[in-house]
Image (tube, grey):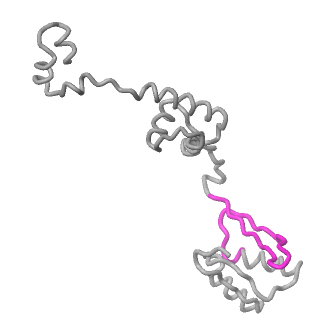
Amino acid sequence: MVRHLVEQGWLSERKACRVIGVSRTGIRHESLKPAKDQLLKEALLQKATQYPRYGYLMLQGLLKQEGLFINRKRTYRLYTACSLQVRTKKRKKLAGGRRLRVLSVVDDFTRECIGQLTDLSISGQWVAQFLNQLIASRGKPRSITCDNGTEFTSKAMFFWSKDHRVRLQFIQPVKPT
């Protein structure tokens, strides 16, 4: 607007800035960033084509290693300006979008996977039946170490462990060891 008033010869730059309420330095300022941004964009595009599965943070790390330091926000701005985006794979929806549950039974001594039970939801009764099948083929263990999931803390598992004289050992919460 100020340039228009000055170019038409209606007002001087100083008066036009005063009327509109803009500082004169703001009107005269020319940004140096586009030249720097162009170099960074080219470097970012080169790294993005070399590593197509990396997101902007990984690419920023690579540029940082080369000595082209950019802050995270600027990297993201350039990343989106170049229309770069790591596409995430869409997961296949099984049975109406529900998650598939897998119970893996592992022998701690031999590190052998003895069996796996797969279903959309696993209840304590399912676990008890599955363990009965494993006992029939492999023998009865003295104890079973398990997490604090609802399928293991259920009444069905409690009574199963009492009937079969198998001790259930629960791990400490939030410590999956």
Q: Residue at x 76, y 92 (%)?
A: 165
Q: In the rendering, at what x and y percent does residue 13 appear?
A: 16, 17
Locate residue 143 relative to residue 47 in the image: left or right: right
The quarter of the image holding the N terminus is top left
Q: In the rendering, at what x and y percent does residue 166 appear?
A: 76, 89
Q: Residue furthest front?
A: 67
Residue 31 lies within the magenta run: no
> Which contiguous range is marked in magenta?
99-126
Where 126 sits versus 144, above or below? above
Locate residue 76 relative to residue 4 in the image: left or right: right
Q: Quadrant of residue 104?
A: bottom right
The quarter of the image holding the C terminus is bottom right
Q: Residue furthest right?
A: 137
Q: In the rendering, at what x and y percent does residue 175 appear?
A: 61, 75
Q: Residue at x 17, y 27 (%)?
A: 22
Where 62 sits versus 78, above or below? below
Q: Residue at x 67, y 87 (%)?
A: 158
Q: Residue furthest top?
A: 8
Tell which of 10 and 93 is nearer to you: 10
Tell which of 129 and 22 is nearer to you: 22
Q: Quadrant of residue 164?
A: bottom right
Q: In the rendering, at what x and y percent does residue 18 appear?
A: 11, 24
Residue 113 lies within the magenta run: yes
